[in-house]
């Protein structure tokens, strides 16, 4: 190690007041080399490097023990450097989405890409905001709610990992109605819309986007409507998750008034959008069914009514058929032959309602175009919405 300086007082002649102080400094320590490994990050690496430097600078020292002051200082410094290195790594990791571990860091990084995960959870009334009502879900986040969300994330780190994946993906999702496909896709996401079809038309001064929809339960666009609790809850959740206004259900809002805030929020500025309904085409069919000998005709009739009905899974279920989709006799055959107890099917009549339309049983195709959608409710009170005549042969009576 370095020696202490040597101090001497020298007197010239016999005068005691003419002394001179002389200091002999020890030899200069070797210059610090530039061989430090900047990749060192842990206690063992720092300790080994400093001990190697000590041995290289003082080769006359032949023995080093853990009890030496120099070794103790090296270990203390290595411990402090290890802590600082860990803090540096943690701080650097919080600046990147892939490595951030603190909830507030991850939440702020997601906000930089436009993904407000805390606000989205509140608007959709997800945990930890599952108990609030729809009106409170629309209010801006408070500091207490943000702290509550961060604390909940600490208890559920798997939710942080899911948000880490969902945030970048949300950047690539189209959240606006720009192209005609966007109008169809965005409107079909609404719980009140089963099918949507968009097209543009020149109306004299500018192009107008026209959108035809098939609403839930085939409601009229402008009629006052009473919605059931399940559908209305889906509507409220959908609007709340996107920060949209929804009307008071007590006012019996029409389908158009419910969809209007959604269109206004997502359409392009200065883009006029006209909402229209589908053109329903009633279908008339006459069917002859051969029933298996082991089945009752009444059971087969009920099964056919379900297969061709408007309920879930029925052939004429609202929204199953697209705008302008032709009706094919082969699809009718396939649907009926899948019914238990049906041996054979004969389609005797297959046409649009109305005397001016020809029977298409021979061609097996009813051509539809534009906004036309085939319907067959088979309701005696509304024959204009299509019906079918069913004749059963064979099987058991009853």
Image: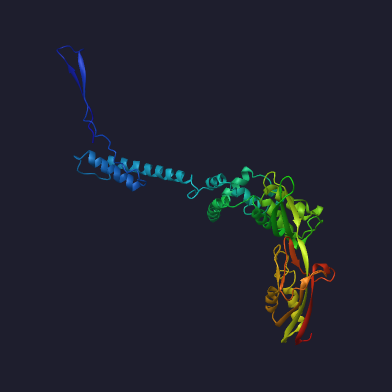
Residue appearing at x 72%, y 63% in the figure:
369
Kindly identify the residue that appears in the image at 58 percent across and 52 percent down: 170
Q: What x and y, as percent, mark residue 335?
A: 69, 75
Indicate the position of residue 150 as horizontal and vertical percent values: 57, 48
Q: Residue lying at the far left in this picture: please name it.
A: 13
The residue positioned 57% from the left and 45% from the top of the image is 111
Count of numbered circles on the image: 0
Quadrant for residue 305, please give it.
bottom right
Relative to 111, say whether 287 is above or below: below
Q: What is the quadrant of the C terminus in the image? A: bottom right
Q: Is residue 339 left or right of residue 6?
A: right
Q: Nearer the viewer, residue 29 or 299?
A: 299
- Above or below residue 374? Residue 206 is above
Snapshot quadrant of residue 386: bottom right
**Which residue is more in the foreground, 324 or 129?**
324
Q: Residue 135: percent from the left, percent from the top?
A: 72, 49
Residue beneath the point at 72% across and 80% down: 345
Q: Position of residue 297 (x, y in %)?
A: 76, 83
Q: Nearer the viewer, residue 297 or 365?
A: 365
- Along the horizontal axis of the image, is 21 left or right of 377? left
Q: Nearer the viewer, residue 376 or 140?
A: 376
- As drawn, is 60 to the left or to the right of 189? left
Against 11, is 56 above or below? Answer: below
Is residue 58 found left or right of 199 in the rendered image? left
The image quadrant that residue 187 belongs to is bottom right
The answer to whether one can see residue 169 in this image is: yes
> Image quadrant for the N terminus?
top left
* Colour treatment of the image: rainbow
From where the camera sits, is residue 190 visible? no
């Amino acid at each position: 190690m370095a020696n202490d300086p040597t101090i001497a007082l020298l007197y010239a002649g016999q005068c005691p007041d003419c002394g001179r102080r002389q200091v002999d400094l020890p030899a200069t320590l070797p210059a610090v080399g530039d061989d430090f490994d900047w990749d060192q990050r842990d206690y063992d690496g720092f300790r080994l490097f400093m001990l190697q430097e000590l041995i290289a600078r003082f080769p006359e020292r032949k023995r080093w023990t853990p009890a030496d002051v120099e070794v103790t200082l090296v270990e203390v410094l290595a411990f402090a450097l290890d802590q600082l290195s860990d803090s540096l790594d943690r701080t650097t990791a919080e600046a990147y989405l892939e490595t951030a571990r603190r909830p507030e860091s991850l939440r702020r990084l997601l906000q930089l890409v436009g993904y407000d995960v805390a606000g989205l959870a509140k608007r959709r009334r997800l945990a930890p905001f599952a108990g609030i009502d729809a009106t409170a879900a629309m209010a801006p986040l408070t500091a207490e709610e943000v702290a509550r969300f961060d604390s909940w994330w600490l208890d559920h780190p798997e939710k942080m990992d899911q948000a880490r994946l969902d945030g970048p993906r949300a950047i690539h999702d189209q959240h606006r109605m720009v192209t005609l496909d966007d109008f169809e896709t965005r409107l079909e996401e609404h719980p009140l819309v089963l099918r949507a079809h968009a097209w543009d038309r020149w109306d004299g001064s500018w192009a107008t986007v026209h959108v035809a929809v098939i609403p839930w339960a085939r409601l009229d666009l402008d009629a006052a409507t009473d919605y059931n609790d399940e559908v209305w809850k889906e509507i409220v959740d959908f609007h709340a998750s996107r920060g949209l206004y929804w009307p008071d259900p007590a006012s019996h809002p029409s389908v158009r008034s419910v969809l209007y805030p959604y269109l206004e929020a997502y359409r392009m500025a200065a883009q006029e959008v006209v909402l229209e309904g589908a053109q329903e085409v009633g279908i008339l069919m006459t069917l002859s069914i051969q029933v298996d000998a082991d089945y009752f005709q009444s059971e087969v009739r009920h099964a056919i009514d379900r297969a061709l009905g408007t309920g879930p899974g029925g052939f004429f279920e609202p929204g199953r058929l697209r705008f302008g989709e032709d009706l094919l006799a082969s699809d009718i055959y396939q649907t009926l032959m899948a019914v238990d107890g049906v041996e054979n099917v004969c389609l005797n009549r297959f046409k649009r309602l109305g005397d001016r339309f020809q029977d298409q049983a021979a061609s097996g195709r009813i051509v539809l175009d534009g906004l036309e959608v085939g319907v067959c409710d088979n309701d005696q009170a509304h024959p204009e919405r299509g019906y079918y005549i069913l004749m059963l042969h064979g099987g058991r009576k009853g």
